[in-house]
Amino acid sequence: MSNEVQEVKDWLRAFDAAVRDVDYERGKTLFADDVVGFGTYASMLEGLDKLVEGQWKNIWGVTRGFSFRLDEAHIGVDGDTAWIASPWDSEG
């Protein structure tokens, strides 16, 4: 496994820990201010504050056991860009 792929897996571990701990501030440190995101609650949100308010705060508090299935993750890295396709597990 390349160092770059390991860094992406470390990022996923940090993010799923923030979700499990309902730690929005820690989660925010993992994203750029101009993030574009979506999820179960919101179809499309532009900007970190909108992502936190419109998705995370509606989901994280009612989700238990969130974790990515890293052994099934598909990860690609090219320079300073990475992509991830990974299933996850959670309840709630």
Image (cartoon, rainbow, N blue to C red):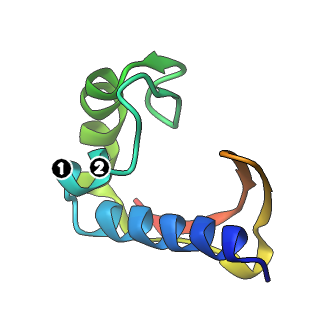
The quarter holding residue 26 reads: bottom left
Q: Which residue is mark 2?
A: 29
Q: Position of residue 3 (x, y in %)?
A: 68, 76
Q: Residue at x 64, y 76 (%)?
A: 6
Q: Amino acid at mark 2?
A: Thr
Q: Nearer the viewer, residue 34 or 55?
A: 34
Seen at 36% across and 33% down, the residue is 55
* Residue 76 position in % (x across, y down): 81, 56
Residue 75 is left or right of residue 87, and the answer is right
Tell me residue 59's x, y (percent): 34, 45
Residue with the mark numbered 1: 25
Extreme residue in the front direction:
79
Q: Are marks 2 and 1 in contact (CB under 8 Å)?
A: yes
The vertical placement of 63 against 38, above or below, is: below
Q: Pointer 1: residues within 10 angstroms few (<14), some, or many (20+)?
A: few
Q: SS of the residue at dot 1?
A: helix
Residue at image location 28% in from the left, 34% down from the top: 52
Q: Tell me the distance, in whole angstroms, between the alpha carbons under discs 2 and 1.
A: 7 Å
The secondary structure type at the circle numbered 2 is loop
Where is residue 64 drawn, in percent x and y? Answer: 35, 69
- Residue 27 in the image: above or below residue 10: above
In the rendered image, which quarter is residue 17 located in?
bottom left
- In this view of the protein, which residue sits in the foreground, 72 or 30? 30
Q: Quadrant of the C terminus?
A: bottom left
The numbered dot on residue 92 is none
